[in-house]
Image: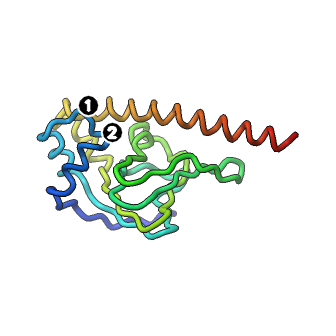
Amino acid sequence: MAIEKYRLPLLDVENVLPMLNKIALLGGLDDAQLYAVFRMLETEHYNKGEFIFRQGGAPSHIRIVLKGLVHIIENVDGTPLELFEFAAGDCFGETSVIAIHPHTANALAMEETELMVIPREKLFALYDSNPKLFGMLMMNIAREACRRLNKTEDIMLRYALSGKRGNR
């Protein structure tokens, strides 16, 4: 069972807003929309080697790396396969949150890591309170999911080909 992290509201608007402009998930948002997203953000801290979430766990937050390094590792028949590496400015966990589907992989902090998080309930509350922003975020999440799916297909193909070569 996962231990629930203590989260704090994000207060450093001057330093964070410029970074938000560079995050693909938030692409195309105007200043008012970015500020609305900023007000939803909370922070989490993870130590090196600490799991952020585990494969099969319930999704609760979209996470953005503020500092540190996160690896996404899927266990396939007991074999860990490293799929992605996320660094400052990268976003992860969004597809599980939107799909309301258990996480398909583990997220592991590879060093001291600070995350900005958007709680699922705050994101879905935008549907009623700010449907235009909600729609833009959903479109950006869909685009990012498509990009990541293409990368995942390439990674899995490389794993499959390296396994076949090893069996010869």
* Residue topped by disc 2: 24
Is residue 11 shown above or below 132? Answer: below
The local crowd at label 2, few if under 14, some if 14 to 19, many if 20 or more residues have their Cα within 10 Å, is some
Q: Helix, strand or loop at disc 2? A: helix
Q: How many marks overall?
A: 2
Identified by mark 2, the residue type is Ala
Picture coordinates of residue 10 (x, y %)? 22, 60
Q: Nearer the viewer, residue 101 or 143?
A: 143
Query: Taking 59 as reference, is 1 left or right?
Result: right
Query: Taking 27 as reference, is 157 left or right?
Result: right
What is the residue that sits farthest to the bottom in this orientation? 47
Is residue 130 shown above or below 17? Answer: above
The local crowd at label 1, few if under 14, some if 14 to 19, many if 20 or more residues have their Cα within 10 Å, is some
Query: Taking 100 as reference, is 125 left or right?
Result: left
Identified by mark 1, the residue type is Met
Picture coordinates of residue 111 (x, y %)? 46, 66
Picture coordinates of residue 68 (x, y %)? 40, 61
Q: Helix, strand or loop at disc 1? A: helix
* Residue topped by disc 1: 136
Picture coordinates of residue 152 (x, y %)? 56, 37
Verify CB contact (< 8 Å) between mark 2 and mark 1: no
For marks 2 and 1, give the one nearer the viewer: 2
Lower sequence index among marks 2 and 1: 2
Q: Quadrant of the C terminus?
A: top right
Q: Residue at x 85, y 42 (%)?
A: 167
Figure quadrant of residue 25: top left
Q: Residue at x 50, y 46 (%)?
A: 102
Q: Nearer the viewer, residue 67 or 128?
A: 67
Separation (CA) of disc 2 from disc 1 = 11 Å
Q: Residue at x 48, y 69 (%)?
A: 48
What is the residue that sits farthest to the left in this orientation? 32
Q: Nearer the viewer, residue 92 or 150?
A: 150
